[in-house]
Amino acid sequence: MKKQYDIIVVGAGPAGSMAARYAAEKGVSVLMLEKDRDVGYPVRCGEAISKAGVEEFIPIDEKWIAATISRFGFVAPNGNEVFINFGDAGFVLERRLFDYALAQSAAEAGVEILTRAYVYGLIIEDDIVKGVKYEYRGEQHEVYAKVVIAADGVESRVGRWAGLKTHIDFRDMEAAVQVTAANIPIDQNTLYFYFGKDVAPNGYFWVFPKGNNKANIGLGVSGITGKKRSALSYLNDFMEKHYPNAPILTSIAGGVPCSITLDKISAPGIMLVGDAARQVNPLSGGGIASGMIGGSIAGTIAGDAIKNNNLTHILTYDKAWGDRLGKRHEIFNRIKNGIYNFSDEKFNLIAQSFLKVPEEKRGLGNLFVTALMNQPSLLVDVAKVFLVK
């Protein structure tokens, strides 16, 4: 490896790969370091994404699509089901293959990639990040860069080492657990969401199809709930009730940062993307598409900063992200706080009311309007993101 690159990206998830690719497309030298042996491993994700979220960044390839999604199912605590048809709107991915494809697209743009490279520190001179220290095959190395982009997940040690405040309140960190199970007889074109105190208090439970009667089945609950009762116990109860004999193929658990973006996601020599920057949608907990968007913005700005020999340009990243998605995420966060505290009776009434809406007229916008009918300030937020074109 060289001793000097224009840009170093730490982490080869979707946000990191897009940051690396978009920077390299500006004609600068980029090194991407991944601590695990394989890009895309381990998978810690429900794997659902909108079609538009994919198409913005990579041509669709059937090999990394497990299921094509055209319906959303809302299941109330009393068992009432409400379905919303979207058309050809989204996918459940095979994340290992998808992440691999994103990293390959970065490589094709000229990015050098090194796996099993464990970053253990930063090179900081005069309070400016100048590079990273990493271990590879038992040997320690230092490599310099004009910009370091941290895509190292919610823990983001890289951001913390750079002096950015990456701490998240436990109340905003959802405890999540998921299994991939076989022999699950559900519609393979529908994402199912369950609500209520018995399945996922202060959160939601999901069943996402993975093709061939497989499904990702899991939940996320608030940190407060998770301290009282484990997310795993809710998952076990659900599986015992609905799918007691389903073979479990994989199990994962972790924290999902369902909060607004960090106050600062750039500083001299450093930028944060994806989970490291808290770019997850706080309402859904989904972070694939928003992470790729954050990565693409950061990579473009970093590349321009180097090409124009103006490294202070990376400090415009915070505003660029805010204008694209950050401000929208603040609205989603307010909606989340309004919805996740609903009682079971409220969820049942929402489903009952929405069942009266003709199926062809149902949409997420009017579902949220129905849910928040008695909360006028949140209805304004709903209008901003779902109704105003």
Image (cartoon, rainbow, N blue to C red):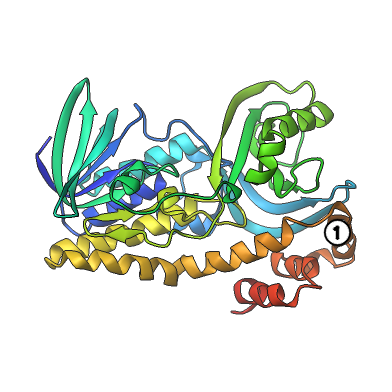
Rendered image quadrant of residue 152: top left
Residue 53 relative to residue 301: left or right: right
Residue at 74%, 28% (x, y): give it.
236
Residue 147 relative to residue 177: left or right: left
Horizontal and vertical percent position of residue 226: 66, 39
- The reply to whether residue 207 is in sight is no
Horizontal and vertical percent position of residue 91: 58, 48
**Frontmost residue, 216 versus 94:** 216
Q: Which residue is mark 1?
A: 346
Residue at 22%, 28% (x, y): give it.
135
User: Is 355 rendered above or below residue 186?
Assistant: below
Which quadrant: the N terminus? top left
Residue 328 relative to residue 104: left or right: right
**Residues packed near mark 1 inside 10 Å, few (<14), some (14 to 19) or many (20 plus):** some
Residue at 62%, 57% (x, y): give it.
283
Horizontal and vertical percent position of residue 382: 67, 72
Query: Which structural element holds mark 1?
Result: helix
Rendered image quadrant of residue 102: top left
> In the rendered picture of this protein, how many numbered marks are placed on residues?
1
Residue at 27%, 46% (x, y): give it.
9
- The reply to whether residue 200 is in sight is yes
Rendered image quadrant of residue 307: bottom left
**Frontmost residue, 103 versus 129:** 129
Q: Amino acid at mark 1?
A: Lys
Residue 26 relative to residue 293: left or right: left
Which quadrant: the C terminus? bottom right
Horizontal and vertical percent position of residue 147: 20, 54
